[in-house]
Amino acid sequence: MNSLFLRGFLVLASVCRIHSYSSGAPPSACVSLTPLHGLSPQTSTAPYSMNVSSTTYGPNQQITVSITGSTLRGLIVQARKSSGETIGTFSNPSTDTRIFQCTANSDSWTHSSSGIKASPTVTWTAPSTNMGDIVLK
């Protein structure tokens, strides 16, 4: 079995001029995972946790991913190899979220509306072959 690590970050808005993307993260946010709201990334601990139904994976295994903590409006999540390449696919997004393609088919999960999301969930499917450690970002 291979390990599945979790790491997340959040950007808080605290200035007057903010660019919002109510229908999901823009393609320009795909590689850096930076929301591009016109603010500096948050440096304090995020008020959210990313949870997985399993911390190890096997070929084609489906793992439920959820975000818990404070309510949120926007998100972008990817599973990546240590090289930064996206890996696996997402499916079954909860209400007000959607799956989209950044660099590969169904490799990213984002919001689909500006509504409040209490505990969004999605299914991540592991690749069919061993890819080593994976990090959810």
Image: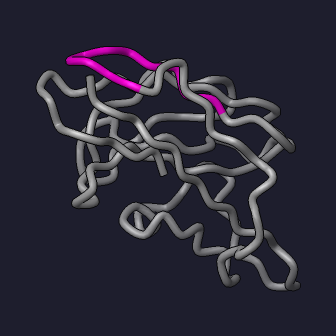
Residue shown at 58% from the left, 74% from the top = 36
Q: Residue furthest left?
A: 129
Side of 135 relative to 122 (left or right) = left
**Nearest the camera: 22 or 106?**
106
Which quadrant of the figure has residue 116?
top right
Magenta segment, which residues?
Answer: 56-66
Q: In the displayed structure, would residue 20 be above or below residue 103?
A: below
Q: In the displayed structure, would residue 113 be above or below residue 74?
A: above
Residue shown at 26% from the left, 22% from the top = 1
Which quadrant of the figure has residue 119?
top right
Q: Is residue 32 magenta?
A: no
Which quadrant of the figure has residue 85?
bottom left
Q: Main secondary structure of the magenta part?
A: strand
Residue shown at 68% from the left, 25% from the top = 95
Side of 75 relative to 30 (left or right) = right
At which x and y percent is residue 60? Answer: 24, 16
Side of 94 relative to 126 (left or right) = right
**Nearest the camera: 107 or 22?**
107
Side of 102 relative to 66 (left or right) = left
Residue shown at 68% from the left, 62% from the top = 10
Q: In the displayed structure, would residue 122 be above or below residue 18?
A: above
**Nearest the camera: 95 or 128?**
128
At which x and y percent is residue 32? Answer: 42, 69
Q: Is residue 65 magenta?
A: yes
